[in-house]
């Protein structure tokens, strides 16, 4: 990806929609996601709803929540409550993503609005940002809808909700994330998309999914953002 391509996109961007787990931190670094998924599966089974193996293949706690959504509101509320508890605990030992602080600072220094849009809970995001001292760098936090797992990314709900709260036009917003669900949600919300390819194989997959740009480092994105302020708004 050429420098001119990156700068051309960034000059269009006044609002940054940033995923949390991946680009900002590894939330389950000290409280592994497979352990959380197993705990949630045990809670579901105790409630009378064993989790099918297809929902446990990735050992992702969010997949257990998605299963709860296929059963009903009562199980969703139960699993959501337990997942929120686990995420709050995990936030206390989450590890910073390299370059994340620099990227948040670059957004602030260039006058961009930055919102975290995540499938994690808003309370866990807030707890982490407060702990690490980044809360003042973030303008808005939008976590998953606690009542409906189907509204998690790749559904664009959280992005559209955030743009509405900020009164920000989609054409000057970008979604930055490390998963294909982030790219899909961004494209569905009609915003620009930047893939953070933090693992082998993600680069090609994100390009095939339609990401407008793909970068392998938040440090690199921070540097690009810092030196590329938004273009002046056209006057009517």
Image: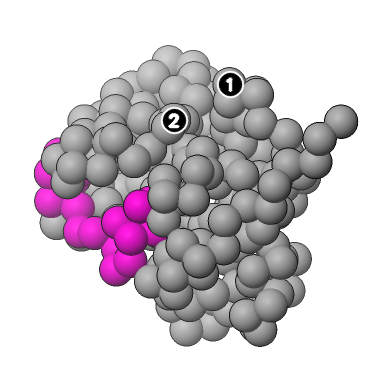
Residue that appears at 27% across and 51% down: 27
Q: Is residue 124 visible?
A: no
Residue that appears at 66% across and 84% down: 2
Q: Is residue 140 visible?
A: yes
Q: Report if residue 90 lies within the magenta region.
A: yes
Rendered view: 190 above or below 22: above
> For the residue labelled by badge 1, is the local secondary structure a helix, a strand or a loop?
helix
Name the residue furthest top: 74
Mark 1, residue position: 165
Mark 2, residue position: 140
**Range drawn in magenta:** 88-105
Task: Give the position of the N terminus as an image quadrant.
Answer: bottom right
Q: Quick one: label 1 or label 2, which is nearer the N terminus? A: 2
Residue 228 location in percent, x, y? 57, 63
Rendered view: 79 above or below 113: above
How far is disc 1 from disc 2 in space, using C-alphas?
9 Å
> For the residue labelled by badge 2, is the local secondary structure a helix, a strand or a loop?
strand
Q: Report if residue 52 lies within the magenta region.
A: no
Q: Which mark is residue 49?
A: none
Residue 137 location in percent, x, y? 34, 41
Residue 5 location in percent, x, y? 70, 75
Rendered view: 74 above or below 157: above
Residue that appears at 29% across and 35% down: 136
Q: Residues within 10 Å of mark 1 (few under 14, many from 20)?
A: few
């Amino acid at each position: 990806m050429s420098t001119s391509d990156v700068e051309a996109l960034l000059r269009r961007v006044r609002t940054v929609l940033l995923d949390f787990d991946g680009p900002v931190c590894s939330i389950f670094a000290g409280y592994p996601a497979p352990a959380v998924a197993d705990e949630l599966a045990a809670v579901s089974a105790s409630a009378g709803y064993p989790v099918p193996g297809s929902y446990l293949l990735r050992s992702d706690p969010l997949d257990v929540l998605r299963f709860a959504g296929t059963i009903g509101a009562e199980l969703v509320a139960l699993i959501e409550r337990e997942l929120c508890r686990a995420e709050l605990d995990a936030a206390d030992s989450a590890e910073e993503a390299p370059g994340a602080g620099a990227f948040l600072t670059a957004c602030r220094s260039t006058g961009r609005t930055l919102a975290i849009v995540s499938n994690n809970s808003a309370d866990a995001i807030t707890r982490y940002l407060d702990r690490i001292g980044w809360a003042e760098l973030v303008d808005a936090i939008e976590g998953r809808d606690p009542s409906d797992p189907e509204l998690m990314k790749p559904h664009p709900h959280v992005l559209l909700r955030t743009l509405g709260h900020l009164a920000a036009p989609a054409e000057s917003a970008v979604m930055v994330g490390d998963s294909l669900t982030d790219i899909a949600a961004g494209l569905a919300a009609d915003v620009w998309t930047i893939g953070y390819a933090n693992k082998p194989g993600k680069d090609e997959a994100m390009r095939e999914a339609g990401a407008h740009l793909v970068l392998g480092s938040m440090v690199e994105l921070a540097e690009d953002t810092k030196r590329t302020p938004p273009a002046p708004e056209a006057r009517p």
